Image (spheres, grey):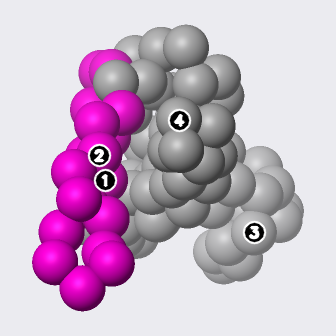
């Protein structure tokens, strides 16, 4: 992930606080979703499949889209927050 593709804005708030807003491109969001599926397929243990060999369609059916999206969002926010925070520190 590079900071060049992110749009980071910051605003001063009362009490020595800073509000940071980061716009994430759709491509990065899709890449995070694909990475979450890959990560979950390697770690999930479903009967009838070797660990790490669960087909994508079976994985989505068994885990549900909500769990996959939650994993993708968690990874996306963690990575993006680190970049956004570093970008704000450079500006100050």
Q: Residue furthest bottom?
A: 15
| Residue 29 pos. (x, y %) | 38, 33
Circle nearer the viewer, 2 or 3:
2
Relative placement, left or right, of 58 versus 90 is left
Pointer 2 local density, CA inside 10 Å: few below 14, some 14–19, many at least 20: some
Which residue bears the numbered disc 1? 20
Residue at the spot of label 4: 91
Which residue is painted at 64% across and 22% down in the image? 2
Image quarter of residue 75? bottom right
The residue indicated by pointer 2 is 10
Q: Residue furthest left?
A: 14
Residue located 46% across and 65% down the image: 74
Numbered range of the magenta stretch: 8-26
- Coordinates of residue 11 in the picture (x, y in percent): 22, 51
Nearer to us of marks 2 and 4 is 4
Instruction: Determine whether, in the image, residue 50 is placed left or right of residue 21.
Output: right
Mark-to-mark CA distance, 3 and 1: 33 Å
Between residue 88 and residue 54, name the one nearer to us.
Answer: 88
Residue at the image position 63 percent from the left and 37 percent from the top: 90
Residue 69 seen in render = no
In terms of secondary structure, where does tag 2 sit?
Answer: strand
Residue at disc 3, secondary structure? helix
Q: Is residue 70 magenta?
A: no
First of labels 1, 2 by sequence position: 2
Q: Earlier in the sequence, mark 4 or mark 3?
A: 3
- Upstream in sequence: badge 3 or badge 1: 1
Q: Residues within 10 Å of mark 1 (few under 14, many from 20)?
A: some
**Label pair 2/4, CB-CB below 8 angstroms:** yes
Q: Secondary structure at mark 1?
A: strand
Q: Which residue is mark 3?
A: 43
Q: Upstream in the sequence, badge 2 or badge 3?
A: 2
């Amino acid at each position: 992930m590079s900071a060049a593709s992110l749009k980071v804005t910051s605003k001063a708030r009362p009490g020595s606080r800073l509000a940071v807003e980061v716009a994430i491109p759709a491509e990065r969001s899709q890449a995070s979703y694909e990475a979450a599926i890959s990560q979950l397929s390697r770690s999930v243990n479903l009967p009838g499949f070797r660990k790490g060999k669960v087909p994508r369609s079976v994985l989505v059916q068994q885990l549900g889209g909500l769990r996959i999206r939650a994993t993708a969002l968690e990874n996306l926010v963690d990575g993006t927050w680190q970049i956004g925070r570093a970008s704000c520190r450079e500006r100050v």
